[in-house]
Image (cartoon, rainbow, N blue to C red):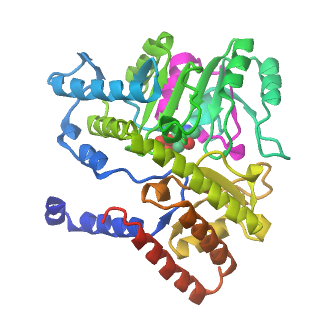
Amino acid sequence: MKNLQQTDSAIYDIIQKETERQEYGIELIASENYTSKAVMEAMGSVLTNKYSEGYVGKRYYGGNEVIDEMEQLAIDRCKELFGCEHVNVQPLSGSPANAAVYLAVLKPGDKVLGLKLDHGGHLSHGHPVNFSGMLYNFVQYEVEKETGRIDMDKVREIALREKPKMILAGFSAYSRNLDWKRFKEIADEVGAITMADISHIAGLIAGKALESPVPYFDIVTTTTHKTLRGPRAAIIMCKEQYAKAIDKGLFPGMQGGPHDHINAGKAVAFYEALQPEFQEYAKNVIKNAQAMANELMKRGYKIISDGTDNHLMVVDMTSKGVSGKESEVALEKVGISTSRSTIPFDTRKPFDPSGLRIGTAAITTRGFTEEDSVKVADIIDRTIQARDDEEALKKIREEIIALCKEHPLYQ
Ligand SMILES: *Cc1c(COP(=O)(O)O)cnc(C)c1O
């Protein structure tokens, strides 16, 4: 980054600082990951200079023959990776991708069934403060208090009663597998469109470690930057029958020109995810999450649904007498990044909820093993216990730096 250093040393220095923070910190935020340098090089390329509103072969600007080649390659690789009939690779991020789907297949006021936010859903799945909750009539299903799991019989009951136009399956904080087939059966029973938002688990599905909704569902959206390990963006996959509506919904419905440099980064990420190593990666992410969850439970931490099938878990920190925010702050002090989270039926406020969401996508990318994951659980436990002891926290910080040095990231 010689040019940046010369032109703008302030931003250069900030990037150096952030590089250092990432290199010597333990990243447990479930929605984060580290892209390869290859992905970053594509994103930092001259493709950022181009305007290409429209789609391959049908652009509203000249000079797009090279961009067409790139976008087609991204599409072909994505189809191979997920086995989808159609894909739109232009969404700028997860929320606009979902917005484009709603715009394509719903009218304002239409009824949609989605998972409640504080039960693991996403803001764009109908939360009242989000456009989705303002424009569409979302009815929400929940997890069971006893098990922390979605009860599909209850989902069916709600669907039969409410007759939604669309049923949405997907989550940001749910650690169990979704029964895609059953969602589809219920939707067929009430004549609803099926939409899956696999933002969190797309990489685990691409790596064949989890079952895919793509064969069953009409429409599947995902971000590309979480377990899929690509650039900060999204894609929309769908059955051929919805292709035209989805493409129109995204452009000109929702967005203007695509970010070609980012789309090239997606193409690189799809290529990487098609390699056999990526299947190893996906398996290891889950093994690491299960190792961490087991160790935390052994130490008396309550985990929602008592374990995990994927890369994440929501820990009820009040089981250790501490709030989600206090935990996040204590862990931050030693260089562990997490995100506080509400738990189902939380009695605390969203700004300082009971839970902590942690995930293993990022640490697995840098080569952490199950043994390391158990170590991380031990460090978390000791940090929570020593949260008011600055000396002890300093020592733990040193341990973390040593552990990070065993698994270099970019340096
Ligand atoms: C992360 C996420 C999104 C939104 O992604 P952004 O890129 O942050 O807009 C949408 N849906 C789900 C389920 C997510 O987890």
Quarter of the image for the C terminus: give it.
bottom left
Q: Can residue 226 be seen in this view?
A: no
Q: Residue furthest bottom?
A: 391
Pick whichever, 354 or 307, lies toward us: 307
> Is-magenta flag for residue 223?
no
Q: In x, y percent, where is residue 159?
A: 77, 21
Bounds of the magenta segment: 95-123
Q: Which residue is drawn at 16% across and 21% down?
A: 62
Q: In x, y percent, where is residue 24?
A: 42, 71
Rendered position, 239 above or below 146:
above
Q: Is residue 146 left or right of residue 257?
A: right
Q: Can residue 17 be seen in this view?
A: yes
Q: Is residue 75 left or right of residue 169?
A: left
Rendered position, 48 above or below 51:
below
Pick whichever, 356 or 276, lies toward us: 276
> Is-magenta flag for residue 120?
yes
